[in-house]
Image (tube, helix red, strand yellow):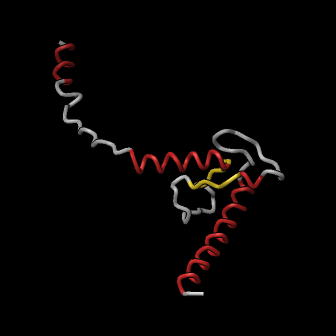
């Protein structure tokens, strides 16, 4: 086995161990319901419920679970498809900077009204 193969195998083992850790924690923390489509899961189909990282960073796993949501495999795929589409095809134009002064002259108007 080459050094490259060993490195890839070790990375996969580490990823699997990390995923198992946060998956188990999230399944204990949250009800077994998809956060998007509300499908409920039982022991028989629990393997179809995945942990989605809200910020898309799989290394960001706070103990309080604030970066996780449980999604069924279909909603999870949809979520990542949207992200991929937006990062690949959608280029937002720069937003214009507001230059007006919303309350310019307000003091003068209030003074005139009081007189």
Residue 47, position in %: x, y?
Answer: 75, 55
The N terminus: image quadrant: bottom right
The residue shown at (54%, 87%) is: 3
Q: From what the image shows, is residue 71 above or below residue 56? A: above
Which of these two is toward me, 69 or 15?
15
The residue shown at (68%, 47%) is: 72
The C terminus: image quadrant: top left
Which of these two is toward me, 5 or 52?
5
Which of these two is toward me, 94 or 68?
94
Asked if residue 69 lies left or right of residue 95, the reply is: right
Q: From what the image shows, is residue 49 above or below residue 95? A: below
Asked if residue 52 lies left or right of residue 41, the reply is: left
Asked if residue 18 lies left or right of residue 43, the reply is: left
Direction right: furthest residue: 44
Q: From what the image shows, is residue 81 above or below residue 3? A: above
The residue shown at (67%, 71%) is: 17
Residue 59, position in %: x, y?
Answer: 55, 66
Q: How many marks?
A: 0
Residue 25, position in %: x, y?
Answer: 70, 61
The residue shown at (77%, 53%) is: 46
Residue 82, position in %: x, y?
Answer: 50, 45
């Amino acid at each position: 086995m080459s050094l490259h193969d060993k490195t890839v195998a070790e990375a996969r083992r580490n990823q699997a161990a990390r995923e198992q850790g946060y998956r188990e924690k999230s399944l204990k923390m949250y009800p077994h319901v998809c956060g998007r489509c509300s499908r409920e899961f039982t022991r028989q189909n629990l393997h179809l419920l995945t942990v989605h990282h809200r910020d898309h960073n799989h290394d960001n796993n706070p103990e309080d679970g604030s970066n996780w949501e449980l999604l069924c495999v279909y909603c999870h795929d949809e979520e990542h498809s949207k992200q991929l589409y937006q990062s690949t095809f959608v280029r937002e134009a720069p937003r214009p900077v507001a230059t007006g002064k919303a309350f310019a002259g307000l003091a003068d108007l209030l003074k005139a009204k009081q007189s």
